[in-house]
Image (tube, rainbow, N blue to C red):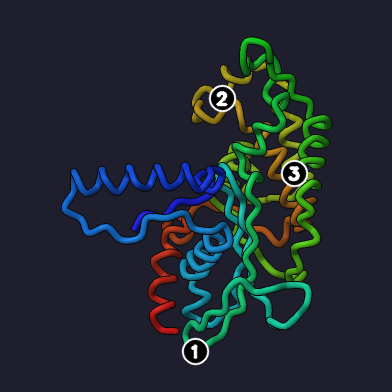
Amino acid sequence: NILSTGGMRLLTIENQTKIYTSLKNFIKKNYPFTIGEIKTISGEKEGLFGWLAVNYLTETLQKGQPTFGSIDMGNASTQITFVIEDPNTKKNNPFADLKINKKDFHIVSKSFLGLGLREARKTIASCYPKNYTINEKLAGDFNFKNCSDLYLQFIDSYKISTELHFPKKMQFIAYSGIYGPLHFFSTESNPEKHTIEDAIQTICDTPWHEFMKTYSQKNTTYLPYYCSDATYISNLLFEGYQLSGQQLLVTKEIKGNKVAWTLGALLYNLVSDTQ
């Protein structure tokens, strides 16, 4: 099976079909594999898969412990997924009801296409380091307050708070695209709003040539984006999702295993066979 996510969801069905047809023909011509499903999955299902991966790796499902919520961040979309006790509440509509180890889980999964890192960054072009060349006519001019205000307006346009009603004390594991920017600022282990924003303001007023020289040992592919992305992530987590730092665990691995929705896709097939 080949499953696609947010980047493909941005395309029209017609363009997706063309890509999948070309892909199928390529596989048939070059490989002896039996072709299974080749399709784009919904953002809600991507979120569900991420939730399964998180709670399998933390062993909450195996041990019958309270589950973690899951926050996944891609380039095109972001997903937040969690369990509710009462599936009949008017505030939440479960996306999936699963029985795992004889226990019922009512799982709410919300996906926001356009709130992925790359798509969000594209809407706020000025939030790059000072004097960073964006194109021939535009250079970065990072200012934390301006950048934060612009991202907050962008997030507010999605009306996230009207869609989310999770238990107040629920713990969330945030991973994928959220980890890299917060790790750059050494705030992933203490993801409090003021800690992240203080680190951004301390580092990101530096002009690009100095910034690049100081942090040249870091992954230079993402270096121009860290200030912008961390500002966006802070606003999304604390203002959009309205979480507190105490509710968050930011990571890329759990017990030495990378957290990824693909593991959850495999688990979902196993769980579905037992329903």
- What is the three-letter code of the residue carrying label 2? Tyr
CA gap between label 2 and label 1 equals 51 Å
Q: Residue furthest bottom?
A: 102
Task: Please tell me whether mark 1 sits on a helix, a strand or a loop.
Answer: loop
The disc at residue 215 is 2
Residues marked 2 and 3 touching at CB (< 8 Å)? no
Q: Quadrant of the C terminus?
A: bottom left
Q: Is residue 222 left or right of residue 133?
A: left
The disc at residue 102 is 1
Q: Quadrant of the N terminus?
A: bottom left
Q: Is residue 63 left or right of residue 92?
A: left
Which of the two labelled residues, at mark 2 and mark 1, occupies the earlier sequence position? 1
CA gap between label 1 and label 3 equals 41 Å
Total numbered circles: 3
CA gap between label 2 and label 3 equals 20 Å
Residue identified by numbered label 3: 195
